[in-house]
Amino acid sequence: DSEEAEFVVNTAAQWGEDWLGAYNEVDCERAADVFSDCEDRLDKAFDAFCAAQKREDNDRRHMMMSSIERHLESQRERILERIRRYRMEGSDKQRRLIPAEEGKLKHLTARLGAKIESLRHKDKLQAAHSFVSGGIIRIY
């Protein structure tokens, strides 16, 4: 499987020795064809993985944005109800709290709005793949 293959490659990279006679012992044309096929498969697998990750990230981001928006609306309604109640039936002391409640609402809207905008801009992240190395491993 892929974990075992990765283990073999990492072990060969760390502990292996250069195979100086590979050019004379290997069908280089066949090796190049196999390498090209492997590279194509890896590219397709990487693209599929990236697409799946992007979908998951988008779903998670949209869920977080919806949650923040629901929280903002809930808090907003509570503050507006308090302000309405203070205006309609509140004492002088409570009416003096109206600017503080309006300030809370403004601060909450700005803070949570910034979080939502931050989440909106996170979809700009892109993954890129680049060739690292390739070769033939001879296992005894």
Image (tube, grey):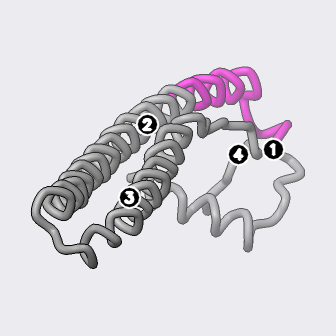
* 24 to 64, vertically: above or below: above
Q: Residue at x 23, y 59 (%)?
A: 83
Do the residues under discs 4 and 1 have CB atoms within 8 angstroms?
yes
Q: Residue at x 27, y 44 (%)?
A: 66
Q: What is the distance, in whole Å, between disc 4 and disc 2 at their CAs?
A: 33 Å
Q: Indicate the quadrant where residue 121 lies.
A: top right
Name the residue that disc number 3 marks.
102
Name the image quarter holding the C terminus. Answer: bottom right
Residue 11: x and y in percent read 64, 69
Frontmost residue, 42 versus 34: 42
- Choose the circle earlier in sequence order: 4 or 2: 2
- Label 3, secondary structure: give it: helix
Name the residue that disc number 2 marks.
54
Name the residue that disc number 4 marks.
136
Q: What is the distance, in whole Å, between disc 2 and disc 1 at their CAs?
A: 41 Å
The numbered dot on residue 126 is none
Frontmost residue, 77 versus 49: 77
Q: Nearer the viewer, mark 3 or mark 1?
A: 3
Residue 52 is covered by the magenta coloring:
no
- Choose the circle earlier in sequence order: 4 or 1: 1
Name the residue that disc number 1 marks.
22
Range shown magenta: 22-41
Do the residues under discs 3 and 1 have CB atoms within 8 angstroms?
no
Residue 51: x and y in percent read 43, 31
Q: Nearer the viewer, mark 4 or mark 1?
A: 4
78 relative position to 2: left or right: left
Tell me, yes or no, if residue 19 can be seen here: yes
